[in-house]
Amino acid sequence: MAQSVGIKDVARAAGVSVGTVSNVINRPDTVASETRARVLSAIDRLGYVRSESARQLRAGRSRIMGLLVLDMGNPFFVDVARGAERAAREAGLGVMVCNSAQSPAEEADYLSLFAEQRVRGVLLTPADATGRNIAAFRRHGIPFVLVDRVAEGATECSVSVDDVAGGALAVRHLVDAGHRSIAYVSGPPELNQVRDRRTGALNALAEAGLGPDALRELPTERLDVAAGRDAGARLLGLADRPTAVFCANDLLALGVLQAMYAAGVGVPDDLAIVGYDDIEFAAAAAVPLTSVRQPAVTMGALAAGLLLEETEAEGGPGRHEHRRVVLQPELVVRRSSLSGR
């Protein structure tokens, strides 16, 4: 196994001091051109690569930003990562993307990894509803910004979408189309987003003079297509089946759509469906899916921007004024909810 080439090896090959090699790498203008050329030749010949992690430890300032999301299998979080990566790259930083898979235990492991790596800061969509993971991570003094979640205190920034408004948009649309019995395929109940979208749905029903019994909730353990298919099967088994369904995200909605297609239930004539997120696959579904759009790329970029503001604040992160940014959702109507009721 080949040994890695260090800065001492380069200095020896070029016949100069370690300090001269360091100057060539970090402050080339301070080194005579002939000496600089000799050092660069040695670097090229030996294949030397600077240890960025060692440099960052010495400087006490990492060029890596951590991003921890609930599910990288969900295109919504891929778009969040795209926005964050774009903003980080413009600032000369890289992004380490990790996936908690909605597991508090995995979230804790990744937060420990970020602390070990001394990342510049972290963008976090929490999986742990208790807040224990965040409390433990806060002790490391590494700045973080909550993404797709509103900060409850004044100790960190957050960027989110008004999910109560989003849930109301979805169900108001269905009520306006004539539906009076609506299912809510809700996902894990411990997630704030799931609860907020349900609150919005109930608000829209109340506006229309309908009680909470007009919303039939079908919880799922996960927010993926397989869970949506399972919810669709349960929906088909109801004796008094609702005429419309609102899903907590598009992956659930696509799973419900698959279950209806397999059972020969027409969408939207027999069952109207509305999703949430407006991922790319929503418009490309066999029956194009009505969805509540979240500006995911913008959310990621704004969150990264807030983190950069905090880490670069004059006087240090402690001088940074934390902000909560709440974006507004938008209903995108497609064929899956346009029945002739």
Image (spheres, rainbow, N blue to C red):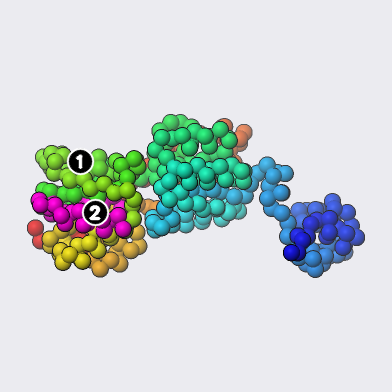
Q: Is residue 121 left or right of residue 212?
A: right
Q: Which mark is residue 134?
A: none
Is residue 106 visible from the viewing direction of this image? yes
Residue pictured at 28% horizontal, 44% vertical: 197
Residue pictured at 73% horizontal, 60% vertical: 49
> Quadrant where the N terminus lies?
bottom right
In this rendering, which labeled residue sits more in front, label 1 or label 2?
2
What residue is disc 1 on? 202
- Secondary structure beneath label 1: helix
Q: Position of residue 278 (x, y in %)?
A: 32, 57
* Rendered position, 170 above or below 154: below
Q: Is residue 231 magenta?
A: yes
The first of marks 1 and 2 along the sequence is 1
Residue range (magenta): 226-250
- For the residue pair 16 and 30, the one nearer the viewer reads as 16
Q: Is residue 212 magenta?
A: no
